[in-house]
Amino acid sequence: MALLEVENLSIDLGEFHLRDINLTVEKGDYLTVIGPTGAGKSILLEAIAGFYPLRSGRITLNSRDVTNLPPEKRGISIVYQDFVLFPHLSVFDNIAFGLRKVERDKEKVKGEVEHIAEELHISHLLHRKPGTLSGGEQQRVAIARALVVRPKVLLMDEPFSALDEKTREKLRKLVKSVIAEYNTTVIHVTHDFEDVFALATRVAVMKDGRLVQVGTPDEVFSRPKVDFVAGFVGTNVLKGEVIGKDGSLTLISVGGVVLKTADEAERKAVLSLRPENVLLARDPGLCSAQNVIKIRVERIERRGHVLWVHLDGKIKLKAVITPNAAEILGVKEGEELYAMFKASALKVIA
Amino acid sequence: MEGLRFRNLSVLFALIFTLFLFTAVATLFFVPRPSEILKALKSEEMIYSLKLSLITASLSTLLVILIGIPIGYALSRFSFPGKSAVKSILDLPMAFPELVLGLALLLLFGNTAFGKLLSDFGIKVVFTKLGIVVAQFFTAFPYAVRVIHTTFEEISPRYELVARSLGYTEFETFRKVTLPMAKGGLLASTIITFARSMGAFGAVLILAGGSYMNTEILPVTLYLNISYGNIGMAITSGIVLVVVSFLAILLFEKLEDEEHGAVRG
């Protein structure tokens, strides 16, 4: 029996709506929800949390119909992008907030709060007021506050998007380990595919208030069911084998080509490369990109304001360039070019 | 060049006007002789008036805030039929001259079945001390509701959603999260309400009747004594009014300072 079941859920909220959402989440799943802005991702989360009345449909949690239960009776926590820490309470009281509702024993509350604070490396902040913390620290407090009550499901609405790249990466690792420790089921809305690759066991793609595909990241990214998903996730996904190191870089052989990545990897690796990070050149020359591959232009496709260049050689790649750049470079189908990308742009995703 | 001249001009305007305002306030304090003020302060009438002013203004402030909080919250959080009508009607007294507001209240409590019913139950509003509170209440209420409404508007409903998801009911969330976060704004509206209640005159005069040593509050004292040519008493009641309002603002700023870190977060 699934932990959470959403059946035929529809909602109308003025300009936003959800239509016939069917979703099943098993215990221990880490489901990321992706989709363009306005697709209804956040509304879906808040509907599951019980913040909006449904127009139709049913939500079951642990085989119990919770459709008409108020949020406080559901045991579902939520973490927002803008942290939403209670400014009038200390970090300790913020984390203890939900716990105090169910646990009268002060020592137990203290123990639980201190434990999760340690897990999330915020023990030294417990006496501070949230306003004095950095974004990364605030989000760790918000995650602690949501997790410490051991929710049946943890909802996260773009939890890392207000943070810088470095903090984001650190936080992903922390979240991963703490989720594992608390054995929590997560639904995580994001627009950052790194979150998907780093955390998700499943991905749901939304568009215009509907779910268009749900599956493992591999299924969705390698075998997108509809064109929309393919276009939306348009990342280059490469598979290869680790063959050694070059200084701090890892060497990975993909289809006979040796690529360099700044990430660590062992044995087999799945790599992602955003098409906008692939540069094209007539002449390799001297440049800072660690990866330079001779490759043939197979097809050029216009999408909106940009051109998608499909490249084929020992490996297949997609690159995004502007029509202007294409003209200067004189890119034509069938020609040989050099594709270049930095070692830091090539991410190990599995 | 053009910009510089405009800048100097605007700064000059600010300075001149402030000086003018300051002079007006200072005149109040320096025109009468100190002995005259002291004598007026000690008069039975002044003490009675000050006491009555403080008591009625505090009472009406308390009522305004107690009733204003749920109304401000409802207007900010919930949609209900007739919401925009409710908003406009609540703002109406602001557009009314105080005298007209007083007249309307006088008619309501004096000449209608509602007024008679209250009166039958022993609740007499017209020409009584209770009338002072009622008049002050309606004078200050729309301003208070505005400030309270804005205060709640500035608190993202997400704080409440998070608290709800952590097991707190709607009312518990209001008590533990929304109210503490609104503290600064509620404090501000309390002070504004108190200052407006202290200074309310027209509506009080009409509804409670400015009768000597009965429904006499500070603005009424000022008015009565001006009409008798009793300048010393009139000025003194003016000074007392200003000092009380000033103390209220001072208190507010002190409390706000203490809250600063917590409210801004």
Image (tube, coloured by chain):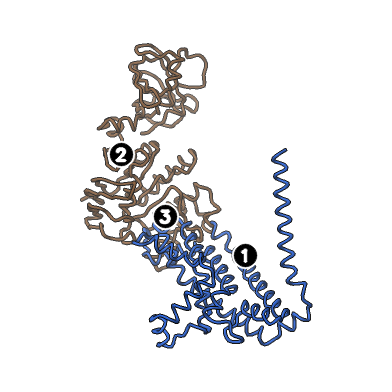
Query: Chain A, which colour?
Result: brown
Name the residue tied to disc 3.
Answer: B158
Q: Nearer the viewer, residue A163 or B62?
A: B62
In the rendered structure, the answer to whether residue B11 lies left or right of residue A239 reads right
Q: Circle 2 is placed at which residue position?
A: A207
Residue at (38%, 63%) from the top-left corner?
A: B168
* Image mark 1: chain: B
Quick check: do tags 3 and 2 share a chain? Answer: no
Q: Do the residues labelled 3 and 1 touch (CB within 8 Å)?
A: no
Asked if badge 3 and badge 1 are on a common chain, one would say yes
Q: Colour of chain B?
A: blue
Residue A1, given in percent of the width and then of the height, sits at 20, 51
Instruction: Confirm whether circles 2 and 1 share one chain.
Output: no
Q: In this view, does A152 lie above or below A167?
A: below
Q: Which residue lies furthest to the left in this view?
A: A1
Residue A243 seen by the camera: no
Query: Dot 2, crowdedness within 10 Å: few (<14), some or many (≥20)?
Result: many
* Residue B127 visible from this viewpoint: yes
Distance from the alpha carbon under mark 3 to that under mark 1: 29 Å
- The answer to whether residue B218 is left or right of residue B230 is left
Question: Image height check: is A31 above or below B24?
Answer: above
Q: Which of marks 3 and 1 is nearer the N terminus?
A: 3
Above or below, comparing residue A304 to residue A331 in the picture: below
Q: Nearer the viewer, residue B246 or B177?
A: B246
| Label 2: element kind | strand
For label 1, the SS is: helix
Q: Which amino acid does label 3 sit on?
A: Arg
Residue that appears at 38% across and 36% down: A193
Q: Which mark is residue B253?
A: 1
Amino acid on which disc 1 is placed: Glu
**Total of numbered circles in the picture?**
3
